Amino acid sequence: MKKPLIALAAATAALCACADGWMGRIADGAFIDQLSIPGTHDSATGEGTSLDAFARTQDLSLAEQFEAGIRAFDLRPSANGSTLGIYHGTVATKISFEEALTQFCRLLDENPTEFIIVIMRHEDDRENDSEKAAWSGLVADVLASEKFASRFIPFSQSLTVGETRGRILLLSRDKYASKPTGGFISSWTHSPDLSEQSKARITGASARESAKLTVQDYYEMKNQEQLDTEISAITALLDHSTTLHTVSGHQWVINHTSGYYASLFATADAYRKNAATTNRTVIDYLADENHAGPTGLIMMDFAGTDRSGLYDVNGLALTEAVIGNNFRYEMKGQYSSIETTMPEPSASLRIKGATVTAPGLIRAYLIDGTHVAEAYGTLTLDNAGLYIVTCGSETAKIAVR
């Protein structure tokens, strides 16, 4: 019988206590498509823009977003003469593409257990013809720069957390070369229809390195009916993605809560109005114990802060809910024997093989909180699975194969 567990609540709190290193508590063998990853839409607007009242969708800088737990970033480089700025539509942000990547490399050097996913789009709204023609070459030159050598990881549908730690996975919606540095995304859509969203794909440098992708990015809500459509689209994709740890194969997911509401055109307040509803939609969805499963990338506005301007945007609560969701379900992965996915057990709680020893009553729970076994002194877990084991105040989370 499932019960609310103080021990499980304490374990969850411990896992979420340090958002900036949360990937360090995920097993190396876990597939990336099995994760729940908080991300930001038009991420670089948090650095400030030339027209904040219209273009701003983030209050926190890139570094502050990372510190809050964000691991997926939407960057939109645009050619400005011979350089690449980052823009939101026609509005410039106060950081260049190269500067953003440099920041990411520094953050990963300081946090080597983590990795970053960059979703890149060619923002060509303000470019002239020569700049449009130069864009791909400028991007290729930046990515090939010596300072970024070995920082990018090639895309594979079965990438694991361990393989990707300390690196950047660059997924581009536009082609800048014959082969991608990371992966190319095709058939991106703004449709609210799940059947259309599921036609997208990610393709790596080899055609064999290809994966199914479902993208929900319905972003223009001028009235309540369209907002209701967005909420339904977000929820429908969550219903799909949160079952993906129970099925075979690899399916990647990008689900947006971002967009603007109750306005004829995009403004910062229209983004805030939308976030106040859509970010809360995902928080409430994940609060249901029946909805434990991977969300994929959740791309939000005003991440890492719950209040922006005059609006309760729920961006910190959503970031924390997505991170915490990773520790509520058993991820598929390339596990070997047993792996500790929380901080190392103390000397009083020892793990060897599938056996746990401790000076007291040891209890074992499934990740959903179901109590499965207990014993004094020594407890052996006979079945494969993901468990939380406790003895007194000591807690560890382990995977048994």
Image (spheres, helix red, strand yellow):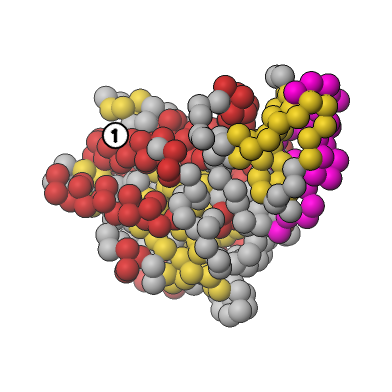
- Residue 339 lies in magenta, yes or no? yes
User: In the rendered image, is residue 158 in sight?
Assistant: yes
In the displayed structure, 254 sits above or below 305; it is below
In the displayed structure, 223 sits above or below 244; it is above
Read off the magenta span: 334-361
The part of the image, by quadrant, that contains residue 122 is bottom left
Q: Residue at x 41, y 35 (%)?
A: 287
The part of the image, by quadrant, that contains residue 10 is top right
In the displayed structure, 200 sits above or below 26; it is below
Q: Residue at x 34, y 46 (%)?
A: 258
Disc 1 marks which amino acid? Ala
The residue nearer to you, when weighing 76 against 68, is 68
Instruction: Locate residue 345 relative to residue 166 in the image: left or right.
Output: right
Q: Position of residue 398 (x, y in %)?
A: 71, 41
Residue assigned mark 1: 276
The residue nearer to you, when weighing 272 against 226, is 226
Instruction: Locate residue 244 relative to residue 163 in the image: left or right.
Output: left
Q: Residue at x 71, y 46 (%)?
A: 399
Q: Position of residue 284 (x, y in %)?
A: 36, 36
